[in-house]
Every structure is written in C-alpha cells, then in structure tokens.
Image: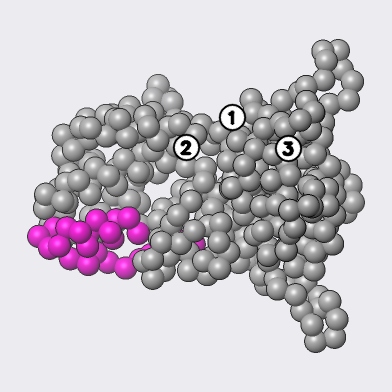
Amino acid sequence: MMSYAADSAPAVLQNRADWPRLYRRAPIDRPPCGLDGDPTQLQRWIDRLTPLETPDIARIEAAMLEVIAVNTDRGGGARRWLGIDGPPMAGKTHATATAMLRVHDHLLKSPPPPIARGVRAEHIPVVYVSDQGASWSRLMRSIAGFVGLPQSKSETGPDILTRLREVLPLLGTRLIVVDDAHMLRRVGAARDLTDSLKLTLDALPVSFVYVGAGLHDSALLRRTDSAGGGYSAAQQMAGRMNRCALNSFDPTVDADINRWHRRLHPLIKRLEQIKGFDSTELRSSEFSHRLFHIADGLTGASIDLLKDCSKKAIGKKRSPQISDLDGLEALAIEGAHP
C-alpha cells in the first residue's frame, strides 16, 4: 500500500523508514487555490486528504490495544489474535494502517529495557507485512525482513521463527499486522498452514493481527481434519480470534444509510473549503443513491469514488455533477477484487 507522506512524496507502509512521514490524521491545510485555479494542484490536494476519519479507525485501534493488553495479562497462556474481516473495498487496509500507526506511536513511549549497560536495541513496537506470499515460511521471512534480521537462503521457517523469538523482545515488538491474510495458502501437508500459524501464535511473545477478505472462508481458518472431531488447529485458531468486521451498509436500513452519509460528510466538508466549490449535487438524494449503488455500500469504495468524481469535475474547473459518476462503475467493479 502506498500513501501520501507529510512532504507529499509517496511512502510505502512495508518500509518502516517511511513511517515517520506517514499521516496519522488527514492534514488540515487549506486548498491551494480556488476552483478557478490550477486543477492539478487541487486534485493532488484531494489525494492528500487521507486518512479520512471513520469510526472503523477508532474501533480497530481500540481492538489492537485490547488484544495487546489481554495477551500481556495472559503471560505464556494461549494468546488471542485479532482478525479484521470484510469484503474488498470496505476500507480495511485504510482503517487498519491508520490505527496501526497510532498504536505504534503509543507503544513508542514505552521502549524495552537496555540489553546491556549503555546498549539499547532499535525500538520496533509494530511490524507490518503484506508481501508474505502464500506460505508460512514466506511469512516468517517477511517479518524478519521488516525488522532487518539477516537471513540466509538455507534457513527454514522454523529456523527463522526461533531467531524471531529471541530478537523481537529485544526490539520491544508488541504487534505484528499481516495484511492480505486471505492470500495465505497451504503448501505441502494439508494442515501445514494452520498448524504453523498456531505454533507461531504461541511461540512469539507478540500479538497478531490478520487482515483479509473473508477470513472465515480462507485457508487461515479452514478446518482440514475429518468430520467427527479430533485435533483441529483451525478450530483452535478460530476460538482464539477477536473478530472486527467491516461490512457494507444495507440500503434497506435507514440507520445504515445515515451511518454511510456520516462516513462521507468529513470529505464533503473539506471539499467545500475550495473557493467556488458547490456541493449541492453531492448532497442531493439522487447523487447519494447512485454513489451508494455503485460502491455497493462499502466505505472504502464510496470515499474513493467521491474523490474520483470530484477530481473529474475539478479537471473541468467546475463543481461535481451526477453525470461525473458516469464511467466510474467499471473502476468500482475492478477495485472490488482482492
């Protein structure tokens, strides 16, 4: 995932050196010009309006802190983990990344003790990976790569796990966030993935967050034992999960429609700061109904489409119209694939 950093240069979440430059909250700078000014500058300003504050961010941040606290109190017991679940384009990565950065900043205030007199390891309280590929071994390598742990090609997943168990406490690592967790697949033996993930959950003194589209139907939690019971790592994994679901809003439920409108209100308020910008069409019931339908009631898709629609109109030096939604349906459908 790429995001705009504080100096407007693209930054990558997988690169922890970029984290100090990433926004924890949307910038409060005013538009660079009015609607009659340079449209390119205005379009870039709209792109920088991230992260837009949604209730999902606060909910996930609280859930992350809760699972860390629970696992700290449990000591060496069976650790809980947080599953952030939902369909594509629900805004999972946006909300998770923002919450994760805020939790990271909070945990930075409590560094680990020095490993020797006058010697302190680098403090890396949160690890983020989304390039773990399909296998558990690749996941271990991605975690090790994020914290800068040297690796050799001959090392196996268990080898790296053993070294991570020794190194992560020295770095003060408390949380590991695995994005696109639905991409994990079994490699080799049928129960390779779930057994290995359960082993990792117990072996590393950290809390895990798995983010994915349809986690319950993914290889992460799918049972592979025969019907009738018996040992199931997937069942144990499911039993330890704290689930945080991000779902689409239901167009037949008035309360859902109202909540959806509140998700878009902060963005529209920011757009109204542009001199000459008229939000009448954006606030009309016809525009809202069509945008909701195109985005399928999903928060992430709705925000992205509203930005795209506004940038399209600004490129023509005018305010958005309902017709600016034309052609955006294909983008929404394409973006809905994980």
Instruction: For marks 3 and 1, give the CA distance.
Output: 14 Å
Report whether 226 appears left or right of 210. Answer: right
Residue 152 vs residue 132, the one in the foreground: 152
Residue visible at 27% across and 44% down in the picture: 308
Tell me the tag on residue 214.
1
Mark before the other along the chain sequence, 2 or 1: 2
x, y percent for residue 1 = 48, 51
| Residue 295 horizontal/vertical position (percent) | 36, 32
Query: Residue flagged by tag 3: what amino acid is it?
Result: Met
Q: Secondary structure at mark 1?
A: loop
Q: Amino acid at mark 2?
A: Ala
Q: Residue at x 82, y 59 (%)?
A: 163
Residue 182 coordinates in the image, percent (x, y): 61, 34
- One can see residue 19 in this view: yes
Residue extending farthest top: 228
> Type of residue at label 1?
Gly
Dot 2 or dot 3, earlier in sequence: 2
- Residue holding disc 3: 241
State the image coordinates of residue 177 (x, y, percent, origin top left): 64, 50
| Residue at the outermost front position | 154
Give the residue at mark 2.
90
